[in-house]
Amino acid sequence: MGIKERQERDREAVRRAILDAARDLFTTEGYRNVSIRKIAERIEYSPAAIYSYFPSKDDIFFALAEEGFRLLGDPTTCTQTAGPLERIRAIFWRLYRFSREHPQYFALMFVDRSVPRIGREYERFAFVLETKRHLVAEIERGIEAGVFPATLNPAVAVRLLTVGLLGVAVLSLSERLAPGEDPECLASDVIATTLAGLQTGVALKSTGVAVDCGAKEPITGERAS
């Protein structure tokens, strides 16, 4: 291994240590209560060394949020041969599983109200808006297939499914479920009952949020709801 390669490897290892320490501190102490100095102390580096990797604490959060959304995955990888309902179930089940498999990322992206809005880094997170567009498109395909009524607003359907699963995930992670209550069963029931309700054509009062990848708006999902 050459000197340049070794330097790059070492630099990436320090960057990884900064992100891991920050993720742990942000989720245990709250984003607002963590300073660059505290992160530096955790990894036994100087604050100046941290600044050589990230210009600010916000930049550390943005790097973690980007990692989190990429860990959440691309919904287009869900089974393409399945029917509309099966694809939608699989896509939204992935959101619930993410909360179980990556609870620290989930807490930062969806729970902590003190984190910066990722709309400030619109270009960096444009792929998240593309994901939302895909979710809306899946509902639209369900409407075209006659699974959902033509009157259904696809953006509202996506919002209802997302909010329901986020609620289950937050209750589970905050240990607010009743003794013996199974969060996986609850999450599955939320998906099933929401889809069943949407199929009935029940009148919805929500108007939803337009999904426009050209609009520099806060991205729904992170503290970004």
Image: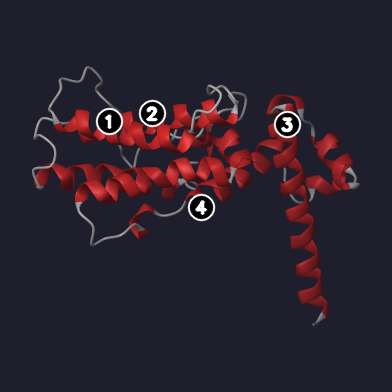
- N-term-proximal mark, 2 vs 4: 4
Label number found at residue 194: 1
In what element is the residue under mark 4?
A: helix
Whether the residues at callouts 1 and 2 have beta carbons within 8 Å, the answer is yes
Task: Tell me where residue 39 sits by quadrant.
Answer: top right
**Quadrant of the rendering where the C terminus is positioned:** top left
Residue 77 in picture, x, y percent from top left: 36, 60
Q: Earlier in the sequence, mark 1 or mark 4?
A: 4
Q: CB of mark 1 within 8 Å of CB of mark 4?
A: no
Q: Amino acid at mark 1?
A: Thr
The relative height of residue 73 versus residue 109 in the rendered view (above or below) is below
Question: Which residue has dot 2 on it?
Answer: 164
Question: Which dot marks residue 70?
Answer: 4
Query: Dividing the picture into quarters, in which one does residue 142 lie?
Result: top left
Q: Earlier in the sequence, mark 3 or mark 2?
A: 3
Mark earlier in primary sequence (4, 3): 3
SS of the residue under disc 1: helix
Closest to the observer: 33 or 204? 204
